[in-house]
Image: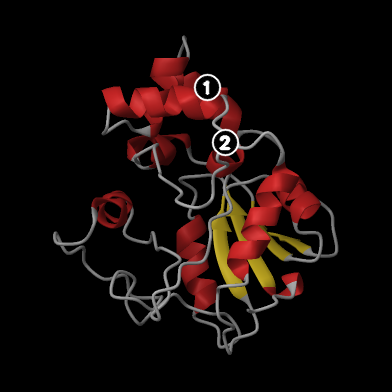
């Protein structure tokens, strides 16, 4: 079992639809950062490969919307667990989620590069509270129109196998019900099913939240 030093965790956090994965590809081209070189991502982070229609929907769906999107699969078949507010929503305690995350990371083999990278959208303050020793690149800014053209069209439901608690909370129960009714539900669909009002106004308010953080482990760009 692998014991990871969290100082080797590198998070790029950015508002959705604001080039987080594009920046992630650039950072992964460095010799000291691991690149997820698989058939779905390709060998070169700077050259996204074309979508193959034979790929699973959860792989090709996001890549059809944004060519720079990539997944955290490894050549040896291992998969680096996700860090996402979409997962946190299933848990009544982030600490309990972190215990599961840490256990799953023991099954992820070491990489020769110094850093293992995640592209996330979680606020950097929350990331620091969970991973205080990690390194964070905080991409500041937002693009409402691009969010509406990309993220809004992404599938909202993800199985997150092995990353959810055995007992379902209210969020999980409602999400599963909606997924059964609308299996192709997008981010925009989910918001419209669970809220009332102007979706675009909600997106603008959400994206305009202040994300600047002063911390020795955070680089704001």
Residue 4 location (% of width, % of height)? 69, 75
Residue 113 location (% of width, % of height)? 59, 86
Q: Residues within 10 Å of mark 1 (few under 14, many from 20)?
A: few
Answer whether residue 189 is visible to the viewer in this image: no
Tag on residue 90? 2
Residue 143 location (% of width, % of height)? 49, 40
The residue sitting at the front extreme is: 166
Q: Is residue 112 left or right of residue 151?
A: right
The residue sitting at the top extreme is: 196
Question: Which residue sits at x=28%, y=75%?
Answer: 39
Q: Which residue is mark 1?
A: 202
* In the rendered image, the vertical position of residue 142 relative to residue 45, given as above or below: above
Residue 51 location (% of width, % of height)? 21, 63
Tag on residue 78? none
Quadrant of the image containing the C terminus = bottom right
Q: Residues within 10 Å of mark 2 (few under 14, many from 20)?
A: many
> Residue 44's image quarter?
bottom left
Q: Tell me, what colour scheme is on the image?
A: secondary structure
Quadrant of the image containing the N terminus = bottom right
* In the rendered image, the vertical position of residue 191 relative to residue 139, given as above or below: above
Question: Which residue sits at x=67%, y=62%?
Answer: 102
C-alpha distance separating marks 1 and 2: 22 Å
Mark 2 secondary-structure assignment = loop
Closer-to-camera residue (91/144) = 91
Question: Which residue sits at x=30%, y=57%?
Answer: 59
> Residue 189's image quarter?
top left
* In the rendered image, the vertical position of residue 24 relative to residue 187, given as above or below: below
């Amino acid at each position: 079992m692998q014991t990871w030093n969290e100082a080797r965790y590198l998070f790029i956090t950015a508002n959705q639809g604001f080039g987080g994965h594009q920046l992630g590809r650039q950072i992964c081209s460095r010799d000291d950062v691991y690149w997820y070189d698989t058939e779905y991502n390709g060998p070169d982070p700077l050259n996204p490969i074309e979508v193959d229609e034979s790929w699973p929907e959860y792989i090709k769906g996001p890549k059809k919307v944004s060519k720079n999107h990539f997944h955290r699969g490894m050549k040896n078949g291992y998969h680096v667990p996700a860090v996402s507010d979409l997962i946190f929503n299933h848990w009544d305690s982030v600490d309990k989620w972190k215990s599961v995350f840490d256990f799953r990371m023991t099954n992820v083999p070491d990489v020769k590069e110094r850093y293992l990278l995640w592209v996330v959208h979680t606020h950097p303050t929350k990331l620091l509270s969970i991973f205080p020793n990690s390194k964070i690149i905080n991409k500041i800014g937002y693009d409402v129109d691009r969010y509406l053209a990309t993220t809004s069209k992404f599938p909202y439901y993800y199985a997150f196998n092995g990353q959810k608690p055995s007992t379902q909370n209210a969020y999980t129960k409602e999400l599963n019900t909606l997924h059964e009714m609308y299996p192709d539900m997008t981010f925009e669909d989910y918001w419209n099913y669970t809220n009332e009002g102007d979706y675009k106004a909600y997106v603008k308010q959400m994206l305009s939240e202040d994300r600047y953080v002063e911390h020795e482990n955070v680089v704001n760009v």
